[in-house]
Amino acid sequence: MRFQVPQFIDVESKIIGPFTLKQFFYLAGGAGLLFLLKTFLPLFLAIILGIPVGALAFALAFYKVNNQSFILFLQNVFRHITSKKLYLWKKVEPEKQKELKENKKQQLASQISVPKLTQSRLSDLAWSLDIKEKAK
């Protein structure tokens, strides 16, 4: 029995005309708010307040920042602004910085130790391996 494997699962389905459900709700909400502004406010004030509302509705529906939806971008901006931040800075003079680098290099060099293999050591190692193989 063959099954059809879904493809393009990261693309939202176009439900209402050429818009996805989210896009439709953002645009409908923006249009509703623009209608309320036009109804209850004078025309000049409605236009001044309506431009940012329309731009926000359009951005929520269509605009992407770094391949992320605009609503996710706004959430990240809000979280960044409201969260606590810790700024650290430690000033190191250039001469002291050179000394620290040299000390690190010396520490690394002292940690790496290559054992010296002499002829007697090699024969001892071969003898111990032969004994262990015979014991098995």
Image (spheres, rainbow, N blue to C red):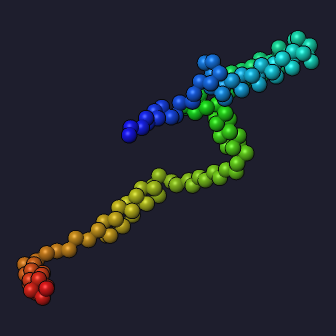
Task: Quarter of the image for the C terminus: give it.
Answer: bottom left
From the top left corner, tell me how far across and down residue 108 is, in percent: 34, 65
On the picture, is 39 further left or further right than 17? right
Q: Quadrant of residue 135?
A: bottom left
Above or below residue 70? Residue 95 is below
From the top left corner, tell me how far across and down residue 59 is, in percent: 67, 24
Q: Quadrant of residue 50?
A: top right
From the top left corner, tell me how far across and down residue 11 is, in percent: 53, 30
Above or below residue 7? Residue 87 is below
Question: Residue drawn 66% across and 29% down?
Answer: 22
Above or below residue 28? Residue 88 is below
Question: Residue drawn 65% across and 21% down?
Answer: 16
Q: Front-most of 113 and 75?
A: 75
Question: Residue drawn 31% across and 70% down?
Answer: 110
Q: Front-most of 13 and 103?
A: 13
Q: How many marks?
A: 0
Say if residue 54 shows up in the picture: yes
On the picture, is 67 further left or further right than 103? right
On the picture, is 39 further left or further right than 9? right
Question: Residue drawn 63% across and 51% down?
Answer: 87
Say if residue 124 shows up in the picture: no
| Residue furthest out toward the front | 1
Above or below residue 24? Residue 66 is below
From the top left corner, tell me how far across and down residue 35 is, in percent: 84, 17
Task: Quarter of the image for the N terminus: give it.
Answer: top left
